[in-house]
Image (cartoon, helix red, strand yellow):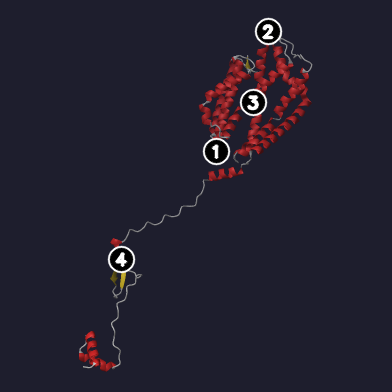
């Protein structure tokens, strides 16, 4: 057998064909047709997707194609949906208003505060100077008004209504210097109180600066009202008591104008300052230093301090004059507590029941007027324009 025949038989055995069939194929394809060689197996692709490794399996469709479906038992639980983003931060309207008001506050250094204080003091002194010059034009009429309580007390005691001057300069110092200064304090009190408010106002909120006009009006009104109360009630009643103490032991009162005026200033100016108590209480509440609850809970200590202060201001040691001084001060203290309560209600945006309070006050006044009318008609009392205002 030739070598070509051996190659055919080996090829037929490798392809599984019989020798006859191989020869037929060779006759059809030709003697020069290439012999098919076995193909090597393809190498696996390391980046190919393997569904079984991730819990998937192939599932056939009706058309014979395959698809991958997730095996539910091997599937991890679905992750919860992401929470919605938080709404944009928004402040409360009141907080926004306070922030705006804080931005409106005037920021000053320590030296700037001192400069502002110096400016306000100079303005106060200028106002006092103008009021002092105006007081010099009617000094004589002022002295007659100041010496009127002494003249009235001396007449009631059956003595000549004259004050005496012991030293040559006593009349000039008292009538032309001290008296105009006292008068200028009352005349310039609205201007001085406005300067006090203007110095404090930059450190307050914008809504609290609206109290400027009420502060000046009420403060000046209370200061003047305190001076009038001392002049028409407290000082006159106390002076009569003091001048009449030595009458039963043959003591003739000769009152020096300087000592008399010093006593007059201490009483009138002291009572006028005490009448500023409601403003002081309101101002402390405005600065958030105190509160109405604290003032009411400690009212007994406040009353004790008022009585001690009244004992210092009162020119006489008797209980009647002490009561005359202390009673209005206690009333003014509680008026200040009420004003501070109104301020707290305004901050909390609440309203005070003014209608009910006004009706209750009108009812109380009607009852008091009825009682006074019954006393005047039944027991013969009559009203007089001086203390105690009722006499037979």
Q: CA distance from mark 3 to mark 1?
A: 28 Å
Label 4: state its secondary structure.
helix
Which badge, 3 or 1, comes first in the chain's sequence? 3
Q: How many marks?
A: 4
Label 3: state its secondary structure.
helix
Residue tagged 3: 273
Q: Is residue 119 left or right of residue 168?
A: left
Q: Which disc, if any, is residue 40?
A: none
Residue tagged 1: 347
Q: CA distance from mark 3 to mark 2?
A: 33 Å
Between marks 3 and 1 in the image, the one whose residue lies nearer the viewer: 3
Residue tagged 4: 53
Q: Is residue 294 above or below residue 166?
A: below
Between marks 1 and 4 in the image, the one whose residue lies nearer the viewer: 4
Q: CA distance from mark 3 to mark 4?
A: 96 Å
> What is the crowding at mark 3: few (fewer than 14 residues within 10 Å), some, or many (at least 20)?
some
Q: Is residue 342 above or below residue 386?
A: below
Which badge, 1 or 2, comes first in the chain's sequence? 2
């Amino acid at each position: 057998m030739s070598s070509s025949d051996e190659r055919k038989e080996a090829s037929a055995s490798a392809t599984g064909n019989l020798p006859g069939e191989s020869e037929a194929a060779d006759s059809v394809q030709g003697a020069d047709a290439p012999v098919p060689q076995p193909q090597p197996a393809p190498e696996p692709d390391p980046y190919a997707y393997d569904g079984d490794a991730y819990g998937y399996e192939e599932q056939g469709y009706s058309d014979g194609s395959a698809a991958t479906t997730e095996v539910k038992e091997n599937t991890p639980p679905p992750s919860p949906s992401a929470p919605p983003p938080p709404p944009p931060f928004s402040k409360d309207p009141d907080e926004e208003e306070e922030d705006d008001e804080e931005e409106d506050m005037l920021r000053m250094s320590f030296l700037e505060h001192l400069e502002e204080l110096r400016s306000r003091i100079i303005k106060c002194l200028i106002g006092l100077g103008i009021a002092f010059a105006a007081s010099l034009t009617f000094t004589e009429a002022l002295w007659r008004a100041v010496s009127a309580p002494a003249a009235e007390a001396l007449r009631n005691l059956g003595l000549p209504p004259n004050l005496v001057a012991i030293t040559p300069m006593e009349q000039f110092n008292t009538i032309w210097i001290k008296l105009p200064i006292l008068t200028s304090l009352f005349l310039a009190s609205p201007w001085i109180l406005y300067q006090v408010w203007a110095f404090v106002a930059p450190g307050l909120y914008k809504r609290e600066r609206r109290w400027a006009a009420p502060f000046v009006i009420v403060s000046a009104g209370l200061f003047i009202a305190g001076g009038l109360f001392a002049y028409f009630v407290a000082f006159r009643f106390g002076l009569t008591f003091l001048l009449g103490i030595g009458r039963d032991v043959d003591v003739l009162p000769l009152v020096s104008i300087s000592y008399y005026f010093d006593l007059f200033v201490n009483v009138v100016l002291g009572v006028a300052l005490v009448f500023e108590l409601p403003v002081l209480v309101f101002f402390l509440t405005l600065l958030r230093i105190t509160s109405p609850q604290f003032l009411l809970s400690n009212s007994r200590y406040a009353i004790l301090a008022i009585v001690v202060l009244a004992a210092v201001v009162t020119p006489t040691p008797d209980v009647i004059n002490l009561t005359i001084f202390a009673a209005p001060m206690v009333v003014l203290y509680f008026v200040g507590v009420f004003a501070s309560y109104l301020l707290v209600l305004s901050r909390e945006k609440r309203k005070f029941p003014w209608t009910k309070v006004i009706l209750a006050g009108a009812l109380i006044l009607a009852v008091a007027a009825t009682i006074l009318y019954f006393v005047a008609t039944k027991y013969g009392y009559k009203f007089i324009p001086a203390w105690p205002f009722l006499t037979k």
